[in-house]
Every structure is written in structure tokens, then in C-alpha cells.
Amino acid sequence: MLITLATTTFRAADWIVLGGYLVLLVFTGWWFSRREAKSTHEYFLAGRRMPMWAVSVSIIATSLSAATFVGAPEQSYTGDLTYLSTNIGGLIAVFVVAYVFIPAYYRNNCTTVYELLEARFGPGSKRATSAAFMVGRLFASGARIYIGAIPLSMILFGTDVAESPNYPVLMICSIAALAVVGTFYTLFGGISSVIWTDVIQTVVLIVAVLAAIVVLLSKIDLPIESIVQQLTGRADQVAPGLVGGGMDKLNVVDVGLDPSKPRWGFDPAAQFTLLTAVLGFSLIGIAANGTDHDMVQRMLTCKNAIQGGRSVLLSIAIGVPLVLAFLVVGLLLWVFYRQAVMGGSTSGMPESKVVFVQFIIKEMPAGLSGLMLAGLFAAGVGSLTSAINAMAATFVKDFYARWVPQRSDAHYLSAGRWAVIGWGAALALFAVACLFWQRASPGTTLIGLALGVMTFAYAGLLAVYLVALFTKRGNTTSVICALITGFVSIALLQGWAWPHWTKHLPWIGTELSQVKLAFPWHMTIGTGLAFAVCVMGKPSGVNRAR
């Protein structure tokens, strides 16, 4: 099969901008390779000399992946701004991480966060949690590569690529492109290369989203007051059948109470409510920023625990406005295409999953489409490079060094680079699996997919760390059982499993089997069950943690 780019609408100016961005990435890769890491301490921790502000920006680049680039506009395009309220949980989370988790890692001089559990429970717990992290990160980052490949395939192979009989093949090509680029930049320079590349890519991402807002406002032939009226549902004429017609799309907080559900008192299927923000998203935030080495590794490159803690606090202060900007893009896309439908220039609203990319390709001025693709690369590659580096660090320090002990630091550095290549390939394979996963679950939004897969490992990991830091209980056996409990409970709460076992419960089984649980409740329930299992373990007597 011959694949060409002839069907795309990219113009010469777009390719020039995109080419300039890729040259910039190549230059930064060469620059960091000039100062090649000579030790694992340098490769995985950057000698603990990274500036706090750069670490904060790198944390943002990791958390704001291609899922945010595509998924956040989708969320506000089909709904409202309630996704922004999840940052209430995020704010709670970063304070807990900054003042509890990060100081504990620095006190114990951890290279990977799972070394703390070795000092607390014994070596078996470190290996178990490291394995759980790698599986969880494989799920989460693999899903993000898949999401990043969706718009990339549209730009490279045409906006109607999803209708092609060769769509899976074209998607695999896009997945491979992201994986190869991400692996290449992780291979040279280690974590310092990742962090500085993240800074560049975050700047590109910010410029791209601001440019999108400016272009949308210029194309919407309405004053700001009329745009607000349409978004709040107060416009004089609301076209029937349009996405979001008549609803208040500027609503930020949904309390989550539902009087129509007298038994439960709230809607358990609602993902972004005040209840889920305070409970589920705070737990997800603590797990992501405190137990996931992909995120924590950045904070450990700071000079001390104070700067490491401040870096995560600063990241949310910068990240919230950036997420809001992407949500604003989704709102303006809704207004723009609603105008087009009412004006008769198009027959219907575009599919939410591809609406932003379709606008980029068909409506952006020459040169800006190339900038948007550069922003997409920045979002996709930024999260990928960090994941690969963290997984390689964990594998080498927590597994390979035990299997092949007493070798030189140069040997382990070489093993780390081979691990980078291996994990890059593994993430690409799981991204391909996600392609078929979501096709089997067409109702799942991209944000829902990206966040939902994270809970499989996060529930057990967070429970183990809460026991380690806040109690004197637990041992290696209870840690392993808790990790298994977290993973299995999240699996049983999935829509494809939930109805099949709950219907056999006495008294409320029939009613319960018809309830749909949003993924923040999965995290809350899974963490609670795993914590109960872990805390039942008697103290191991190994505790060397400080």
C-alpha cells in the first residue's frame, strides 16, 4: 500500500513551521548529547541541580499530554467547564505531596520513589510496587500515545482517515512516529534532556493554544456578549438538535446531587462533580504526583526537598490557566460550528473527538496549521519521553541491578539506555491495543480513557504509600495483596464487568447492576479496599525509613 501526504491540506508555510520546530528538537537533542551523562545519578536525577521553575514546567508538560490537546476541547465542546473543577482535587493533592511525600523521598535519598517502601517494608515491597508502576505507566502513557496519534494521522493522511479501510495501519504508522521520536530524545542526556525539552515544548504548546483562541475569535462574527449569551443558553434562538443547545456551557461546578436518584442521592455516572473532585480526583492527584515515578522523578532533580515541593505547587498554578485555555477552545469551536449549521454552510456539527484537528486543518491560516501540529508533537512527545525515562530508571534500579549485581556504573548506564528502547517499543504496542480498546467502547471520551486507565495501578499504589507514611502497619505480603486488590477491584468496577457480578448480590443486586460508576469512584473504592488490605498486615520490623 502506498501512503502519501497528497490528500492533506497542509501548505508550504505549514511544512516550513513544522520543519523549523523539528529542527529545533534535533538541535536540542544534539546539544544535550554533547554533555553525555556519565553516571546513573546524572542520567536519572540530573545531579539534583535542575532549577525549580524548569521542573515545574516539565511537570506541566507531562500532565498536559496529547489527551489534553485533543480531549479537553472535546470535553467543553460536548459539555461545559466542569472538567476545570477537578483542579479542586488537584490543589488538595499537591499540598499533600509537597509537604508529606517529597520530604520523605529526600530524607531517604531515593533515586526511585519505590526505594522508600524498601526501607519501610523490605525489598519485596519495592519490587512489587515498581512492577505495579511500570504496568500502570504502560497503560497510561500507551493510551496517551494512541490519543496523540489520532490527530497526527488526520494531518498526515487526511481528515477522512477514519473512514479508510486501512485506518488501523495508518494509525499504527502514526503511533510508531510518536514512539520513535520520543525514544530518540530520551536516549540522549537522560532526565535533564527530558526536562529542558519539556520547557521548549510547553512554550510551543502555549503559543499554539493561544493562537487557536485568537483565530477562532476572528472567525466568529459575533461580539463577545453574544458569544457569552450562546454559551449560557440565553441566546434568542437555539437551534434544535445541536450539541449542547440550551445548556449553560460556562458552568464550572456541578455539586453532583441528583434528586431523581433517591437511593443514591447523587449521579454516580457523572465524572466531573464537586464530590468526585474532592474525593476521586484528589486521590488521583496524590497518586499521580506522589507515587508515580514518571512525575516524582522531576521533583527529585531539584536541589532539595523544599524546591522539589515548591515545583509541584507552582506547576498547578501554571497548569490550571493552560487547561482553561484548551477548554475555551472547545467552547469557541462549539459556537463556530453552531453558527455554520444555522447559516446553512454545513449539515451538522463535527464529531467531538476530531473537531479541534478538523478546525486546524481546514480553517487555520497558512503557517498556523503547522504551528498546531508542532503543538501536538509537543504534547505527545513531552509526556512520552518522561514516561520512558521513568520506566527505564525504575527497571534498572529496582530489577536489573538486583539480577546483575556488582557491575560498574557505566554498565548500568548502558542497561538504562537499552531499557529506554525496550519501553518505547512496549508503549507503542500498548497504544496499538488502545486503538482496538476504544473502538470496542465508542462512548468513552478521550479524557475518560486517559484518566480511567491510570486508576488500575494508582489505587493499589496510593493505598500502600498512605499506609507507609501515616501508619506503623503493613509488611511485604500485605503490600503485594493490596496492589493486587487495587488492580482487581478497578477491573471489577469497569462497565464490561460490573453488571455481570453485581446482579448476583442479594437484595439490591438487580438495581446495583444497572448503576454506572464514573472512574473517579473507581479510584475512591479501589484505594479504600487496597488500604484496608494493606493496613491489616502486622508491622514487618524492617522499618528503616526516616
Image (cartoon, rainbow, N blue to C red):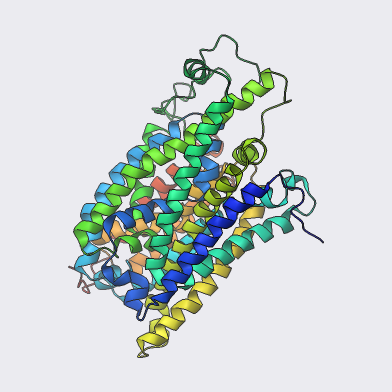
- Farthest right residue? 1
Quadrant in the picture for the N terminus: bottom right
Instruction: Please provide percent x and percent y for residue 509.
Output: 52, 39
Residue 340, compared with residue 422, is above or below; it is: above
Figure disc tally: 0
Instruction: Give the image quarter of residue 101.
Output: bottom left
Q: Nearer the viewer, residue 382 or 362?
A: 362
Quadrant in the picture for the C terminus: bottom left
Residue at left 27%, top 65%? Answer: 474
Instruction: Please provide percent x and percent y for residue 279.
Output: 35, 41
Residue 123, compared with residue 88, is above or below; it is: below
Residue at left 48%, top 35%? Answer: 327
Residue 520, compared with residue 412, is above or below; it is: above
Residue at left 64%, top 16%? Answer: 239
Can see residue 242? no
Can see residue 249? yes
Instruction: Give the image quarter of residue 441.
Output: top right
Residue 406 shown left or right of residue 73 in the figure: left
Residue 473 shown left or right of residue 112 in the figure: left
Instruction: Please provide percent x and percent y for residue 427.
Output: 55, 64
Residue at left 50%, top 15%? Answer: 229
Instruction: Give the image quarter of residue 531.
Output: bottom left
Instruction: Please provide percent x and percent y for residue 332.
Output: 54, 28
